Image (spheres, grey):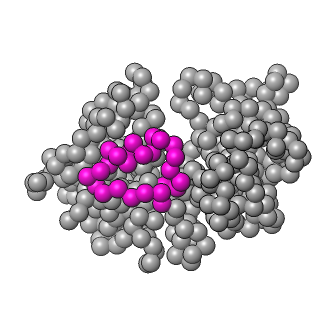
Amino acid sequence: MSGPNTMSAWRYSTAYGGLEKNLRAVSDAPIPSHDKLRSNQIIVRVRAASINPIDYKMVEIPVVGSHMAKMPATPGKDFSGDVVHVSASNSTGLSEGQRVFGRLHGQPSLGALAQYILVNVGVDACVALPDGVSYESGAAVGTAGMAALQSIRPFLPEKEGTVLINGGSSGVGTWGIQFAKALGAKDIVTTCSASSVDFCTTLGATECIDYRSTDIVDVLKKKGQVFDVVADFIGTPTNLYKECHHFLKPTGYFNQIGASPSFSGVTRLWFSQYQPSCLGGGKRNFAFLRSQNEKEDFELVGKWLQEGKVKAIIDSTFEWTDAINAYKKLKTGRAKGKIIVKGIAT
């Protein structure tokens, strides 16, 4: 049982051998103090959190990973919940009792898998959760939703754009397909397994390429230079960028989100970004994008959720006490959509 100055949280002191093997539920984590809140700070009671590969990939890197967060640490970036405290000089535009959703910045030590979180509005993203949108749907936006929106929206023509989404059934991909459709894309081509074709088509994909039975690059080459944007959410096949000049317009953009934090993965990213085409590098605009906490983007997705233009695709929802199994499921790579962990029951 938590005391008056403590709360329940999932914590780990090392990620050696795997984050899920080191997570422990505690009831004596220090609760964020509301006595000296700055004008941009609020305290949120977490009602739901969504988990992401970034939660474990960075902290599991040998040697370096142990310095990514101050230990003991609580994982999780994406949240929804209720504002329980604001400062006397509150400048956030949010009020106590208001439902909110958002995303914590960086690799937080005090993450979303906690009873309460301290949110630095402006650095962390936190906006009102629209009426009719569930806590689970709000929590599902976060990292994956921003990655999808920010890799497509700024680069898509206003009318009849064409998009290739690599990894359509992933947590990011399910948002990406829907966002491309909401933004008016004419053709939305995605890669997925044969078993996910109907799923991705329902979300708005106009064509699905089975990555298991075909060579994705060969199939795309036959299409010619038709795409305005390639959004690579999984990082494989590893030659997708190098060969993209065959299917991406000269004015198009190749935006990569998914990548391995391994040495080989980082090396490929470096060469993709900096190796000149005359020395064997790619021949199209390339960017490795990281989700940004843009208030306007969160508000736009919230509006689309409320209007029914998009929906949160939730693969599975785990009770608070089952967070370890949530990470085990995430690590299988087989989730279609987001994995949610409910907040601790009152």
Depicted 98 relative to depicted 61: above or below? below
Image quadrant in which you'd find residue 25: top left
Query: Left or right of 267: which side holds 276?
Result: right
Query: Which residue does the image show at 32% across and 67% down from the upper left?
Result: 82
The C terminus lies in which quarter of the figure?
A: bottom left
Image quadrant in which you'd find residue 309: bottom right
Give the magenta range: 314-338
Query: Which residue does the image show at 75% across and 26% down from the upper left?
Result: 275
Residue 321: image x %, image y %?
25, 52
Image quadrant in which you'd find residue 248: top right
Query: Which residue does the image show at 34% across and 38% down from the upper left?
Result: 20
Query: Left or right of 310: which side holds 6?
Result: left
Residue 211: image x %, image y %?
69, 43
Query: Left or right of 299: which side holds 167?
Result: right
Q: How many marks?
A: 0
In this view, the residue in front, 221 or 80, is 221
**Does the magenta-highlighted stretch encompass residue 333?**
yes
Residue 164: image x %, image y %?
74, 51
The N terminus lies in which quarter of the figure?
A: bottom left
Residue 104: image x %, image y %?
41, 51
In this view, the residue in front, 173 or 64, is 173
Depicted 78 relative to depicted 240: above or below? below
